[in-house]
Image: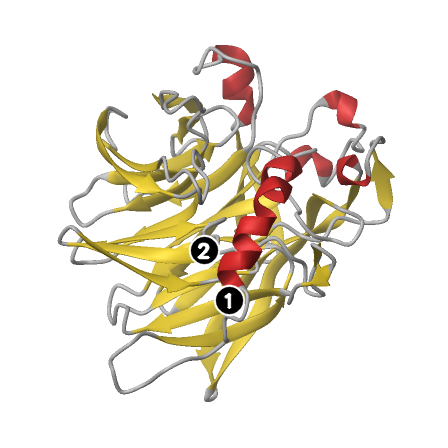
Amino acid sequence: MVRTAPKGRFALAAATGVALAVTAGVAPASADSSGKPVIRVIATGLDNPRQLSYDHGRVYVAEAGRGGKTCLGGGSPEEIQCIGTTAAVTKVFWDGGKWRHHRVVDGLPSAAGKDGGFATGLDGVSALNGSVWGVETWAPPEAGVPKGKPWNTLGKLLNIGHGKARIAADVSAVEFKYNPHKANLESNPYAVLALPDGRKIVADAAGNDLVAVSPNGKARPFTVFPDHDRNESVPTSLALGPDGKLYVGELNGEAAKPTARVWRVDPRTGKILGWKGGFGSINGIAVNGKGDLYVSELFAGRVTKVAHGKRTSVKVPFPAGVAVDPYDGKVYVSAWSVADRDGTALEGKRTPGGQLWKILGF
């Protein structure tokens, strides 16, 4: 259990200078008469908030956790990972005139730096008609993580309810049985999307592919994404568009090299139908009812909207998951997604803790 971002803590740490430069001074709320988007912080105290899912007035947040007290690894401080059972899924909702949040399930595996930042754990969540699903990253045997519960959830699709996370399918087993990308055997289930037909699609970021899970829990290879621009694809995020097609965001790209793509995929066959490019590293996507695309660019420090061929952006520090209310078009995004509730150290400074933002008029 050694990854934080889909390809590792080093990938994140290498780009923090760019992200800090872009996001420094971002205010938690802004509005004026010019019609610019309004930003509101609706939840704080989150531990490395990652993917989001909107379902009937509730926003579900995958919290990768803050690691724990048992530290593994050696070498430089960046290589040390501290493990614990601090990953969770949190529900954020409006009640009694204010925003509240409640952990639907907690106590799941997490690994992080010593200060709780740059965690990995339960990174993906998808809610549909009251059913909630999550995915946990995988850890190789040599990582030294414990055996037994809840560590047996690593690399698995989880059915979440009544305060428990039940194993629904072994996603990482697909990588080790088929190696769909035909490269190194690595697995990091990072995003999940529940489809109306009962299937779940999981993005395996380290495997560079999608895995389809049938309603009875059978997992199989679905879509493999090609390398491009001298990098692997690294799929990190999923959305279902009003056209009935899957949209898949990838990490390939940096703020200075916007090579990341949003792929369009047939949800029945897994065939790649096309793509939009020119993004920085993508860590979340959403599509509204009009087909407008929202792209969370992690290191560029922004969420970009693509509508009718035009791109507009809102600054968000270390954004991850994105979700859209299909009724009123409000946009939700995970901010400070590399920090636990107390913040993390970047370039000698302390960041705010993990947050959930609501963006109006975007």
The quadrant the N terminus occupies is: top right
Mark 1 in CB contact with mark 2 (< 8 angstroms): yes
Q: Quadrant of residue 123?
A: top right
Q: Which residue is mark 2?
A: 52
* Label 1, residues with CA under 10 Å away: few <14, some 14-19, many ≥20: many
Q: Quadrant of residue 244?
A: top left
The quadrant the C terminus occupies is: bottom left
Amino acid type, residue under disc 1 in the picture: Leu
**Side of 335 where 346 appears, left or right:** right
Task: Identify the mark nearer the N-term, 1 or 2.
Answer: 2
Q: Residue at x 45, y 37 (%)?
A: 251
Asked if one can make out residue 225 in the rendered structure from this viewpoint, the answer is yes
Percent of width and height locating residue 299: 50, 48
Q: Nearer the viewer, residue 12 or 98?
A: 12
- Tell me: residue 232, above or below residue 153: above
Percent of width and height locating residue 109: 70, 43
Q: Residue at x 65, y 39 (%)?
A: 9
Percent of width and height locating residue 336: 57, 60
Tell me, for residue 356, which label it has, or none.
1
Amino acid type, residue under disc 2 in the picture: Leu
Q: Quadrant of residue 101?
A: bottom right
Q: Residue at x 78, y 31 (%)?
A: 147
* Label 2, residues with CA under 10 Å away: few <14, some 14-19, many ≥20: many
Q: How is the image coloured?
A: secondary structure
- Looking at the rendered image, the disc whose residue lies closer to the viewer, 1 or 2, is 1
Q: Nearer the viewer, residue 276 or 215?
A: 276
SS class, disc 2 = strand
SS class, disc 1 = strand
Between the C-alphas of marks 1 and 2, the distance is 9 Å
Q: Residue at x 23, y 47 (%)?
A: 241
- Tell me: residue 208, above or below residue 349: above
Q: Nearer the viewer, residue 136 or 340?
A: 340
